[in-house]
């Protein structure tokens, strides 16, 4: 998958005398703990199809994420496709080009037309003040992304959606555990999609979930992820297969036990970066959002000098063994398959951020020494020009 290939090994081996620092490293439970967790599967021989681990994880996530309803999936992308199908979206959907491929590809694969809105210059989420002008008689929904764990302008988006009778699906892949004034991020909009991919803050190796308030959606999601089957002799609709298996759910149960520790370690890394990088001219870091309990999922920096130094710094860091990622570059609208299909939609802020952003290494076991090493490289070069 693009994520893990690109995030962990996109940069070719380079001459470096220091140990390589990857951009992301998956958090794993102690080996014995996972083995203990899956032991019962050898007794029950129940490996998938809503087993015990699956049920336990669903319940535990309902509490942890502070949401009404949860449906688990084999990955976040298929969960998103199921949400689009269940809400019966048609025609055009307003979304952001500053995201991972999955968001737009889900729309295209479900036969919809993405309409790209620009993003905010401060937190890189969809700019709600520019949304209404994109609405046409064909618009059925808005699909914003809580990018890097930054919370979208949920109130303004809700007001616009209400006024124009639009559905809202949030791509919440980056916001596991985030709350807004104590409210679970997954309770906003009609449905939110979480990804539990190996590179995310919380993972089930591959995995994902939908969260929602309307209990009527739950049986629909169960059908869509299991061939439309509702009983031994009843198949209600042409569903696909997107079930989370017991080994994935077991990994989730182990990782959830340790999530507070993971968050605390991430917080420490972020705070060290903040303290070291904030004073460096030409580098902008993410600000905290008022009322938002963050999850410290990514550490993107934006190079603000008139001459764009992003690519130069990426190469410099790589030669010193520090792997970073231009996350998100290119914009979805610049993908090869797009072939300028949506070129008439200009999103200058998104373009500028994509051209200037660099995501630094951030994972729980990144040491203070590693962070110092990374910041020293950045500071030294940025201060001598
Ligand atoms: C990871 C991710 C997805 C897709 O999730 P998978 O579980 O990998 O299918 C979707 N959107 C965004 C923004 C992501 O980062």
Image: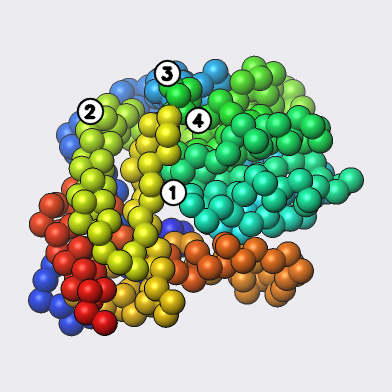
Between disc 1 and disc 3, whose residue precedes? Answer: 3
Which is nearer the eye, 212 or 376? Answer: 376
Mark 2 lies on residue:
36
Q: Which mark is residue 63?
A: 3
- Mark closer to the observer (1, 3): 1
Q: Secondary structure at mark 4?
A: helix
Q: CA distance from mark 4 to mark 3?
A: 13 Å
Q: CA distance from mark 3 to mark 2?
A: 23 Å
Which is nearer the eye, 384 or 336? Answer: 384
Respond yes or no on whether mark 1 lies under 8 Å from ligand 1.
no
Q: Residue 105: x and y, percent? A: 64, 56
Q: Quadrant of residue 357?
A: bottom left
Which is nearer the eye, 356 or 70? Answer: 356
How crowded pointer 3 is (Cα within 10 Å; few <14, some 14-19, many 20+) is rated as some
Q: Are marks 4 and 3 in contact (CB under 8 Å)?
A: no
Q: Secondary structure at mark 2?
A: helix
Mark 4 lies on residue:
185
* Residue 173 showing in the rendered view: no
Q: Is residue 289 above or below residue 94?
A: above
Respond yes or no on whether mark 3 lies under 8 Å from ligand 1.
no
- Mark closer to the observer (2, 1): 1
């Amino acid at each position: 998958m693009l994520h893990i290939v690109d995030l962990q090994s996109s940069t070719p081996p380079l001459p470096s005398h220091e140990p390589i620092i990857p951009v992301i490293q998956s958090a794993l439970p102690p080996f014995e703990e996972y083995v203990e967790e899956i032991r019962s599967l050898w007794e029950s021989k129940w490996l998938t199809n809503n087993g015990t681990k699956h049920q336990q994880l669903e319940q535990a996530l309902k509490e942890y994420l502070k949401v009404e309803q949860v449906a688990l999936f084999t990955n976040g992308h298929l969960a998103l496709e199921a949400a689009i199908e269940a809400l019966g979206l048609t025609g055009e959907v307003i979304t952001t080009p500053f995201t991972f491929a999955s968001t737009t590809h889900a729309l295209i694969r479900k036969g919809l037309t993405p309409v790209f809105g620009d993003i905010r210059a401060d937190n890189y989420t969809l700019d709600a003040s520019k949304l209404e002008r994109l609405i046409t008689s064909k618009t059925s929904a808005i699909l914003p992304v809580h990018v890097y764990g930054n919370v979208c302008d949920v109130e303004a988006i809700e007001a616009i959606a209400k006024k124009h009778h639009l559905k809202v699906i949030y791509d919440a892949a980056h916001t596991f555990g985030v709350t807004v004034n104590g409210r679970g991020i997954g309770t906003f909009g009609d449905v939110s999609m979480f990804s539990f991919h190996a590179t995310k803050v919380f993972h089930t190796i591959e995995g994902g979930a939908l969260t929602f308030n309307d209990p009527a959606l739950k049986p629909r999601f169960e059908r869509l992820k299991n061939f439309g089957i509702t009983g031994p002799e009843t198949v209600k609709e042409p569903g696909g297969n997107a079930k989370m298996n017991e080994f994935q759910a077991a990994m989730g149960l182990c990782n959830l036990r340790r999530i507070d520790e993971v968050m605390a370690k991430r917080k420490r890394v972020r705070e060290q970066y903040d303290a070291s990088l904030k004073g460096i001219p030409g580098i902008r870091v993410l600000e905290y959002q008022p009322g938002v309990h963050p999850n410290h999922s990514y550490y993107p920096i934006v190079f603000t000098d008139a001459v764009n130094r992003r690519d130069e710094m990426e190469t410099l860091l790589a030669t010193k063994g520090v792997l970073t990622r231009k996350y998100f570059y290119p914009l979805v609208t610049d993908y090869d398959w797009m072939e300028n299909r949506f070129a008439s939609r200009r999103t200058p802020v998104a373009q500028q951020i994509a051209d200037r952003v660099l995501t630094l290494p951030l994972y729980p076991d990144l040491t203070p020494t590693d962070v110092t090493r990374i910041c020293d490289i950045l500071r030294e070069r940025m201060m001598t020009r």
